[in-house]
Image: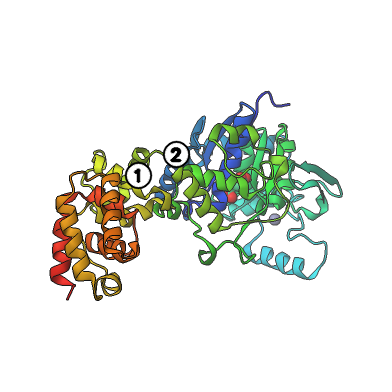
């Protein structure tokens, strides 16, 4: 039926890109990649009031950031209105649709009835058989009309969903639905099917909130005389509280993740796992490998639970596997924001070395500035708690003065050289190593945590270490 696998992502630009939609985009991309097919981007912007150009931009940037490159598009539905008109005329010519002149009140009555009467779908088809005369009169009166599809009665419509399995609907449950609104704009179902048919989309992968649209869409394919694609309806993404994903259990919009210091490859990896679309035990996938191992039929029937802890873990893994220079490049936006660098395109070696020292502890790109700032800045601030705990203590004065002497005399300011002279000092004085390392660390870094103390001293350098110890002696040590 279809000569090539083609999928599409068809967001409406009415808000930021929701993480559930991102997963939908990813699965469409992976599905097409695995089958050497094509992935198409289509912006469904026929809702003129709610669609915004800024959102289209956000969608495009988000997909690019994630590396979900499309083969064709972005197609804008608002630029394809002629096509929908043409298809509407075709359906009219073939007697598949009819004009409905019902007033707001009539429709409201029918809707009310449908709530009370079981089996009544909301529209009774009364305009199907309107006489030509009557229609002309109504049009002369200036009555608005919509176009409705003639849906078959009492037919069992069956399709095989790649995730949900067999889905059956009786067409009696489908009213003659609107395909073109009174302002001439196509409805979602109509524009979507016209485009999917024209673009020869072979597999429709989307959220299961659209499952109830699918029978209607199948009827539209038929009416248009087009091949019906295969469908896969993805379960929703829920938070760890089992409810629809909300701000409380994890950010909802993709750009929050970008701003929050996540790597696109980690997010992709996580979203692929989220649906259970890969083999059970493997957690981390190279991009190419993911394309090969992705299997839509493995996606579970129940909602995927978005677990931010797991995403953090995966992100940390990717970060730890990345060369420090690359990490610095990825973090350049955040480094600049925190004034650690001035120019995003020019990252000093010192910054890369500092990242290297702290890499094991980094989980998100946003962690980087505060982990390395004290290693790079001329003036550090001293954490009051650290000062109180480690410097404002008896005996510290002597130790810091001694260590200052040790550092001044030290010829080899390498990690190894420093360690040797410290060990010797501790041994000579017969004091515990911690008693020396802790105050020295705080004196030279202003904080309790950081890289190993010798890494720290080596990195900061002889001159600065001595200056800082002098400063600490003067300011904090009685
Ligand atoms: N514009 C629709 C949405 O964003 C597309 C649904 C579909 O993939 O058919 O929900
Ligand atoms: Zn009507």
Seen from the viewer's position, the closer of residues 397 and 113 is 397
Q: Is residue 220 visible?
A: no
Q: Residue shown at 35%/44% (left/top)?
A: 356
Q: Residue shown at 60%/39% (left/top)?
A: 28
Q: Residue shown at 66%/41% (left/top)?
A: 278
Q: Which quarter of the rendered picture does the N terminus lie within?
A: top right
Q: Position of residue 347 (x, y in %)?
A: 25, 41
Q: Position of residue 71 (x, y in %)?
A: 52, 29
**Numbered tag placed on residue 356 in the rendering:** 1
Say what secondary structure mark 2 lies in: helix
Seen from the viewer's position, the closer of residues 107 and 279 is 279
Q: Residue furthest top?
A: 3
Q: Can you tell me whether the CB of the residue at mark 2 lies under 8 Å from the nearest atom of ligand 1?
A: no
Q: Position of residue 453 (x, y in %)?
A: 31, 55
Q: Is residue 40 visible?
A: yes
Q: Residue shown at 26%/42% (left/top)?
A: 344
Q: Is residue 268 left or right of residue 99?
A: left
Q: Is disc 2 surrounded by few (<14), some (14 to 19) or many (20+) residues within 10 Å? A: few
Seen from the viewer's position, the closer of residues 332 and 59 is 332
Task: State the residue position of label 2.
Answer: 64
Q: Quadrant of ligand 2?
A: bottom right
Q: Quadrant of residue 379?
A: bottom left
Q: Position of residue 215 (x, y in %)?
A: 75, 47
């Amino acid at each position: 039926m279809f000569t090539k696998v083609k999928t599409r992502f068809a967001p409406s630009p009415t808000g930021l890109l929701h993480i559930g939609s991102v997963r939908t985009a990813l699965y469409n991309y992976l599905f097409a990649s695995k089958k050497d097919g094509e992935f198409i981007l289509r912006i469904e912007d026929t809702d003129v009031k709610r669609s915004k150009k800024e959102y289209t931009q956000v969608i495009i940037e988000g997909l690019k950031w994630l590396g979900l490159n499309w083969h064709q598009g972005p197609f804008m539905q608002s630029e394809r209105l002629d096509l929908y008109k043409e298809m509407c005329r075709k359906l009219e010519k073939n007697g598949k649709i009819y004009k409905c002149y019902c007033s707001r009140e009539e429709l409201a009555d029918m809707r009310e009835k449908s709530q009370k009467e079981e089996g009544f779908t909301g529209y009774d088809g009364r305009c199907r058989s309107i006489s030509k005369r009557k229609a002309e009169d109504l049009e002369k009166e200036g009555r608005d009309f919509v176009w409705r599809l003639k849906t078959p009665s009492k037919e069992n419509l069956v399709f095989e969903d790649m995730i949900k399995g067999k889905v059956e609907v009786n067409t009696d449950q489908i009213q003659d639905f609107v395909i073109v609104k009174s302002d001439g704009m196509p409805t979602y179902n109509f524009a979507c099917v016209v485009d999917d048919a024209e673009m020869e989309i072979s597999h429709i992968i989307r959220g299961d909130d659209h499952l109830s649209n699918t029978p209607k869409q199948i009827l539209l394919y038929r009416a248009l005389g087009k091949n019906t694609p295969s469908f896969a309806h993805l379960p929703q993404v829920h938070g760890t509280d089992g409810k629809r994903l909300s701000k409380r259990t994890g950010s909802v919009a993709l750009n929050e993740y970008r701003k929050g210091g996540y790597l696109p490859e980690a997010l992709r990896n996580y979203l692929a796992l989220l649906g259970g679309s890969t083999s059970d035990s493997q957690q981390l996938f190279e991009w190419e490998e993911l394309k090969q191992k992705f299997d839509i039929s493995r996606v579970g029937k129940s909602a995927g639970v978005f677990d931010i802890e797991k995403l953090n873990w995966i992100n940390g893994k990717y970060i730890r596997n990345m060369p420090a220079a690359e990490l610095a490049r990825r973090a350049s936006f955040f480094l600049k924001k925190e004034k650690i660098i001035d120019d995003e395109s020019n990252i000093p070696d010192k910054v890369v070395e500092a990242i290297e020292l702290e890499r094991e502890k980094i989980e998100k790109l946003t962690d980087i500035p505060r982990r390395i700032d004290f290693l790079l800045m001329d003036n550090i601030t001293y954490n009051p708690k650290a000062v109180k705990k480690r410097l404002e203590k008896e005996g510290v004065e002597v130790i810091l003065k001694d260590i200052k002497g040790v550092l001044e005399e030290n010829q080899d300011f390498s990690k190894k050289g420093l360690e040797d002279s410290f060990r010797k000092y501790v041994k000579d004085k017969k004091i515990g190593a911690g008693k020396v390392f802790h105050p020295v660390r705080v004196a030279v870094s202003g904080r309790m945590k950081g890289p190993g103390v010798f890494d720290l001293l080596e990195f900061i350098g002889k001159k600065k270490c001595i200056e800082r110890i002098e400063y600490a002696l003067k300011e904090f040590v009685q």
